[in-house]
Image (tube, rainbow, N blue to C red):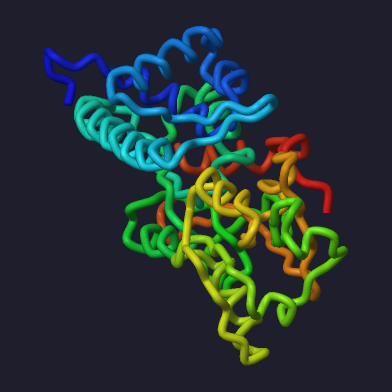
Amino acid sequence: MFGRDKKMTLNQLEYFCAVCRCHSITKAADELYVSQPTISVALKKLEEEFHLRLFNHGKNSISLTKEGEDFYKSAEQIIRQSQDLHTQFSEMRSSNPPVRIGIPPLMSMVFFPRLADAFQEAYDIPVRLYEYGSVRARKMLESEGLDIALVNMNYYNIEKYNSLKMMEDQTVLCVSRTHRLAKEKIVTFDMLAEEKLIMYNTDSVQNEMILSRFHSMQIQPNILMYCSQLYTTLNFVRKGDCAAFLYSSLAANPRDFVQIPLDPRLSTDFGIIWKKDAFTPLRTSKFIDFASGYDITPYLPTL
């Protein structure tokens, strides 16, 4: 893939993925500390090399084409493999092992990367973030594949772990402005019996909570897709004939969507957990102490 006759670079893929995450070239440039033209040139080179149109450019918006969505999935995989390779071999010679933290994929867009960056800058202790749903992250914590997990704390046996609550959010229904429910002030689960729905990945606590609500009302939901990528989810919702369950902090920014509260309300606490009655390395303890004093209010939704 990176042979002599190919021009694609990891930097180009990182720029592309940043635009996908931020939904904006400007925001991606700010996040990566590079100029907007640098990112624009990288995107153009990718499109020219693969003879693809990766983005649709609107007046005030940018969205992935179908080819762009497929390319995004592959690009993310390549970057993740590159990061894993670097981690594996750099840590062989390192006396400063990282704090390994699992985070739900969608919540990685709210505040946690900023917290991790601030901690690394303060202590010069590396942090490795791994995208796992809350259910899988807890299993990884048990097998010592992770030191800490950021999870949905509305789980039946959360008391088994040491924990620190960090934020509260609520699940809302996200629809396009042309959807038949767009003008509703609230939606109940019986109103969604026939709707095409997009759910979060199957290893999430949010899914269990939502499906439990449906099953208690003897409703079999019409689930169109399980997805962990916000960009893909919103592109499906943008078509106007389906709805997605999202946390309000993720549904607040896009201007062409409406977020509708659920009735009864579905609130969620997010926080970090770590093993009880087990040795906690000093680097992990330092991260926990740092997180407990870190101000995340600028990134929280208004509930």
In which quadrant of the rendered view does residue 237 lie? Answer: bottom right
Question: In x, y percent, where is residue 174?
Answer: 69, 56
Percent coordinates x, y for residue 292 in the rendering: 66, 43
Horizontally, is 9 left or right of 275 in the view? left
- Image position, residue 90 (x, y; %): 24, 26
Question: In the rendered view, does 266 fall on the left or right side of 73?
Answer: right
For the C terminus, the image quarter is bottom right
Q: Nearer the viewer, residue 143 or 44?
A: 44
Query: Where is 70 relative to 246, above or below?
Result: above
Query: Would you say residue 110 is visible in this rendering?
Result: yes
Is residue 276 in view? no
Looking at the rendered image, the quarter that the N terminus falls into is top left
* Farthest residue, direction bottom: 218
Q: Is residue 291 above or below residue 140?
A: above
Residue appearing at x 25%, y 30% in the figure: 91
Q: Position of residue 35 (x, y in %)?
A: 54, 8
User: In this rendering, is residue 206 above or below 297?
Assistant: below
What residue appears at the point 61 percent right and 64 percent down from the top-left corner? Answer: 153
- Nearer to me, 187 or 86: 187
272 relative position to 128: left or right: right
Quadrant of residue 221 within the rendered picture:
bottom right
Residue 62 lies in quadrant: top right
Name the one closer to the observer, 157 or 31.
31
Question: What is the total number of numbered labels drawn onto the structure image?
Answer: 0
Say which residue appears at 43% left-offset and 48% top-offset: 131
